[in-house]
Image: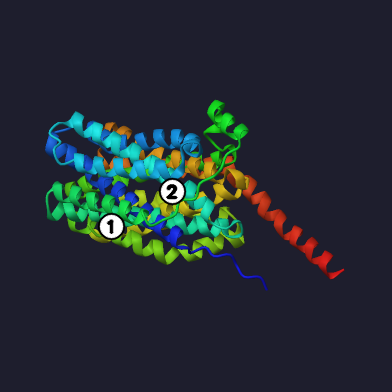
Amino acid sequence: MSKRPKLWTKDFIILMGTNFCIALTFYTLMTTMASYAIQEFQASESNAGFAASIFVLAAVFSRLLVGKFIELIGRRKILYVSLAVFLLASLCYFPINHLYLLLAVRFLHGAAFGSAATAMMTAVMSLIPDSRRGEGTGYFSLSSTVATAIGPFLGLFISQHADYSAVFVACTIFAIIAIVITIFAKIPEITLTTEQRQQMKQGFGFSDFFEKNALPISIIMILMGIAYSGIVSFINTYAESIGLTDAASYFYVVYAIVLFASRPFTGILLDSKGDNIVIYPSLILFASSLFLLSISSNGFTLLLSGALAALGFGTMMSAGQAIAIQLTPKHRYGLATSTFFVCLDGGVGLGPFFLGFLVPEIGFDGMYLTLSLVVLFTILLYFLLHGRKASAKHTAQPSVMQTESRKKSM
């Protein structure tokens, strides 16, 4: 019996840690930035939402550019420079005294985040053995998924028990840790032929920036990102308005616990029963989570919403990325992952800006109800873009397996 190639190497573990640190910074600031802009600079709801979302918009922009040129410049160079700029941007929050300066720093911070994350993912794809590609990608993405739970909790907890400078101190520490541990990782590079180098310099078509096979599920994640941004960016302010601040501080604790408990089962279910058996319930549960938020009047309802958000959005993040990878040729795995996160990050980035216009008109409860309806609409969109194909593919699998079994028995 042949030995399975090693997945958990030193470099793989280090890059997981680095990815966790920068993602933790992103979600910690995403949760507190709208409230910070309102309290410190008397920003409108729309401008406050933009202060949160411009980070992600910058990340999307840098992901597109770095994804195309990373092999030309070099993964190690881009990763180290990006992490250095990431730390510099973290320090720049302290002297800010105007909203426009805040927006400039948020853009710089987001661009550094996007380029660092893309460089890490590209390097990790080279570290993962081909025979364990799906498993390795799933484990690595867990470092970001965990940050979606811990980061918002830290942001809410610190901002409620200290001033916003303490939030910036925490994020600066995360950036320093990311740089220090990355020094000990060996970043794999790729040697390009003259023809490949020339093609990368000249190619500016759609396929040079996006993987078409990953687009259907990635489009779904745009709407998921917009809906989730309503939670990440505004739940603190919403909880204050309905007198549930204490319960809100435990929202992401519940989210994290349920996420960890459910992840092994949802992964096995996806592999054994197909995409639809996981995706459809996830969309329904996420819509239910947003609906509960819209009618929350006590701590139990708010925390139940957090549990359903983990089963809904948390599952969609991992399952969606797995679907994007499995539909893509191996040599374009990196581009598929980039496509997936460009769409997801784009939704999270644009969400607070547009929702900031919605809140003054219909309130936070109306916003969450609207987002719940958007997610329900996504069920139909998923069916049209991927669900019906996934159903036909899974239905055909048993007959294929039976054919293979008969061949072996002959």
Quarter of the picture containing the C terminus is bottom right
Q: Is residue 128 left or right of residue 98?
A: right
Separation of disc 1 and disc 2 at Cα?
30 Å
Write the residue at 44% across / 39% down.
Answer: 342
Q: Quadrant of the N terminus?
A: bottom right
Q: Is residue 294 above or below residue 45?
A: below
Q: Amino acid at mark 2?
A: Met
Residue farthest right in this picture: 410
Label 1 with label 2: CB-CB less than 8 Å: no
User: Depth check: 239 or 62 in front?
Assistant: 62
Q: Residue at x 19, y 56 (%)?
A: 157
The residue that mark 2 highlights is 120
Q: Is residue 282 left or right of residue 299?
A: right
Residue type, mark 1 in image: Phe
Number of numbered discs visible in the structure rendering: 2
Disc 1 packing (10 Å; few <14; some 14–19; many ≥20): many
Q: Nearer the viewer, residue 181 or 287?
A: 181
Is residue 369 in sight in this rendering? no
- The residue pinned by badge 1 equals 251
Q: Is residue 199 above or below residue 299?
A: above
Left or right? Give the position of 49 relative to 73. left
Q: Nearer the viewer, residue 359 or 212?
A: 212
Image location (x, y in percent) of residue 306: 33, 57
Q: Earlier in the sequence, mark 1 or mark 2?
A: 2
Q: Can residue 346 be seen in the rendering of this structure?
A: yes
